[in-house]
Amino acid sequence: MRPAFSSTVLSARRRAFTRGVGATARLTVTLVVSGALVGTTALAHAAPDSGSAGGPVNAVAPPQQPTSGPGGSDYAYTDMRVSSGGEGDNAWFAFEPVGGPPLASAPLAVITHGFGEYSGYEKLHGLIRHTVRKGSVVIYPRWQASPRTPCPKGPGDIEPCVQSAVEGIRGGLSFLQSDSARVQPQLDRTSYFGLSFGGILTSNFLNRHEALELPRPRAVFLDDPHDGGFAGKGEPALDDTLAGIPADTLFQCHIGDEGIVALEGNQDSSCNALFPKLGHIPPANKNIVLTYTDKHGTPPLLSAHGVSNGSPNPDTRGSIDAYDYFFIWKVWDALRSAADSGADREYALGDTPEHRYMGTWSDGTPVTPLKIQDHAPIRP
C-alpha cells in the first residue's frame, strides 16, 4: 500500500522540515519549499563578515551567480516538493520540481552526503535545490542516523554503509514510481554526485550497479572523496577495481588544495587514489580537477575538504559562493547535459577556458582558475 503523505508550504529559511527522519520512525512527509536562495556558508566556504553591517568599505566582492548557462540562475521551476521516508539508516529524501511548466517525468540525480548527516539534508541543500529547480528529480539517501551506525568502523567495514545508501535510493525510487501523480524519474538519464565519504560509497555501489539493480550512471561527480583514513592512507575502503562503472560514463573528481591531500601523508588519497581505478574510461570522458583557495576579496573563497556543501539556510551552513556557481553547479549541469545530448561539454570536460573559468572578482581580477588533468596524481 502506498504510504500516506501531506503537503505544506514553508519558507526556505525554516528548518523544521530538515529534522525529517528519526532513527526508528517510518514516515513519509511531503513539503513544498519556497523562497529564493540566500547567501550561506559551507564546510569549505568562508563565514560571512562579522564586522560592520555593510562590511569593509570598498571591499572586493566575490563573483555572483551567472544569469544563464550551466550553473546559472535561469531556473525553469521556482520551488521544490520535499518528501521523506524510510527507517533509520535506510532513510531517504525525494525532491521534485514545482512552480513551473507541468512535468510528468524528469532526469534523475542521486546525491549522496558524507559522514555526519544524521538528519535532514542541509549539507548539500544548495546543490539539491539548484538541481531540482533546473528541472530534475533528486533522490538523497540519508544513510546515517548516528555516529555509531551503520558502519562505526568506517573504512574497516564499509559494506553496511553501502547497503544503507542503496536501500535509501531504492526507497526513494519506489516512492516516486508508486504514484503516477509524482514526477517520474527517467532512469535512463541518471547522474550521481557524492561528497567525501559519500563519494566512496557512490564509487562502490556504482561499481556494482548491475548486481544491485541501480540505474546505470550517465555522469558522476565526486567532491573530495575520502573514507576517513582510519584503515590507512589511500582510500582502502574503495573497491579493489572500479571496472564495473560503465566506460562511457562522464566522470569528474575534485580535490581542494587545502582538503584531504593537504593532510600529512595524504597526497595520494582522495581522487589521486580513486582515479587510477578508472583506466577503462577514455581520457576524453574524465577529469581530475583541483580548486585553490583565493583570498583576493571578501569573503575569501576557500578550498578545503568539500566545496559543494552550501545551504540556503544561513544559520546552519556558510555561504553559497563562486565555487558553487562557477564550479560545482556549472560542472554538474554541464556534465549531465553532455551525457544527455552532448551539449555544454566544454564547461565540464577537458582543459578548456570554459571549464577552467571560476568567475571574476568585482575589481575585474579572475578567480584562480581550475587545474584540470585527465590523469592522476594532481598536485596543488
Image (spheres, rainbow, N blue to C red):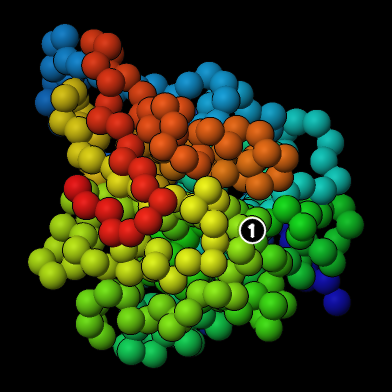
Q: Position of residue 5 (x, y in %)?
A: 74, 61
Image height check: is 84 above or below 152?
A: above
Q: Quadrant of residue 319?
A: top left
Give the camera-side residue of 30 and 298: 298
Instruction: Residue 207: tell me if it is visible.
Output: yes
Query: Could you tell me which residue is drawn at 85 percent across and 77 percent down?
Result: 1
Give the camera-side residue of 214 and 144: 214
Q: Bin the neighbour count of mark 1 within 10 Å (Cα to Cα): few under 14, some 14-19, many 20 and up.
A: some
Q: Amino acid at mark 1?
A: Asp
Q: Position of residue 276 (x, y in %)?
A: 39, 67
Query: Could you tell me which residue is drawn at 33 percent across and 81 percent down?
Result: 236
Q: Position of residue 94 (x, y in %)?
A: 65, 58
Q: Position of residue 145 (x, y in %)?
A: 44, 76
Image height check: is 346 above or below 150?
A: above
Give the camera-side residue of 226 and 13: 226
Left/right of residue 11 with respect to residue 175 in the rendered view: left
Query: Could you tell me which residue is drawn at 20 percent across and 33 percent down?
Result: 294
Q: Residue furthest right?
A: 180
SS category of the residue bearing label 1: loop
Instruction: Residue 49: tell me if it is visible.
Output: no
Left/right of residue 117 with respect to residue 344 in the rendered view: left
Query: Could you tell me which residue is drawn at 44 percent across and 32 percent down?
Result: 352
User: How many marks overall?
Assistant: 1
Q: Which residue is mark 1?
A: 248
Image height check: is 137 above or below 280?
A: above
